[in-house]
Amino acid sequence: MSLTMIYGIKVDQELKDSDMEYMSAYLELEECLRFSKYIRKIDKQRFLLGRVLLKKKISELLNLNVSQIRFSYSEYGKPVLQKYPDCHFSLTHSGDWICCAVGQVPVGIDIQHMEPIELDIAKNFFSSTEYNNLLSVHKPDRKDYFYDLWTIKESFIKATGKGLMMPLNAFTVRPCYDEDCKMIECDLEKEAHFYKQFLLDSEHKMAICTKGKVRILEPRVVSIDGLMS
Ligand SMILES: CC(C)(COP(=O)(O)OP(=O)(O)OC[C@H]1O[C@@H](n2cnc3c(N)ncnc32)[C@H](O)[C@@H]1OP(=O)(O)O)[C@@H](O)C(=O)NCCC(=O)NCCS
């Protein structure tokens, strides 16, 4: 069974300007333009760390130099490597965390920082079955359940590469907590997708979804120093 790896960075401090300068050398022209458009340092930092983490991990897998990793974008905005169509990856950022997944099958990964939320928005984004299931959950556990659904659904639409072109209420997910890897059924996708969930810390949930069943290890946390070596 093929293996999909997850790598994460916890960003709980501001990067030094010298570190940002060092890392921005990994960006290609188009990425530099995007980087320069972010106003807040936190957004610049998040974009930079995400790109560098992803490029480093892909370059290790493919045994290439980081500068050889050049993304193009699908019609729905998913980054892809045209020269290496069998290398699949996904990137996500939320709250204090940035994570990427890298492997040999299409993959989507999503983190959500579990902020207080008005659960009514689930009416617009979830299927009616999911919304009713949410309402049937014991009230104190609803927020948790909401974020389970949200991360799983987002990881699925990222694995398909369709992003928000795939209506979030067009398929139904039922989180179950007693198995390792669970299946997502969706009439809009022919092939079975599987998901797995992780709690990164008490405030951040993550889900990963793959086309077909693969082995997925616990996320490996990378330090910022490790990223620069
Ligand atoms: C873009 C989207 C695919 C994910 O966005 P997100 O969850 O806000 O952000 P994440 O950090 O998890 O993911 C962003 C990354 O997804 C990747 N991405 C963009 N389009 C993608 C697509 N079509 N397929 C897969 N990945 C995609 C990019 O690498 C992007 O990183 P970058 O901006 O640094 O290039 C899209 O699903 C989205 O905007 N979702 C938010 C929708 C929402 O409000 N849901 C509410 C549910 S209750």
Image (cartoon, rainbow, N blue to C red):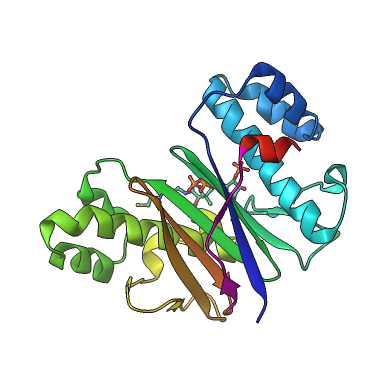
Residue 29 sits in quarter: top right
Q: Residue at x 80, y 52 (%)?
A: 59
Task: Please say whether residue 139 is one of the residues in the magenta stretch.
Answer: no
**Residue 106 appears anywhere in the view:** no
Q: Residue at x 38, y 79 (%)?
A: 179
Residue 140's place in the image compared with 43, above or below, is below
Q: Position of residue 26 (x, y in %)?
A: 79, 35
Task: Please say whether residue 217 is one of the residues in the magenta stretch.
Answer: yes
Q: Position of residue 1 (x, y in %)?
A: 65, 82
Judged by its main secondary structure, the magenta piece is: loop
Q: Residue at x 32, y 73 (%)?
A: 177
**Residue 164 left/right relative to 121:** right
Residue 117's place in the image compared with 200, above or below, is above
**Residue 189 left/right relative to 57:** left
**Residue 141 appears anywhere in the view:** yes
Q: Position of residue 215 (x, y in %)?
A: 59, 75
Q: Residue at x 82, y 60 (%)?
A: 62
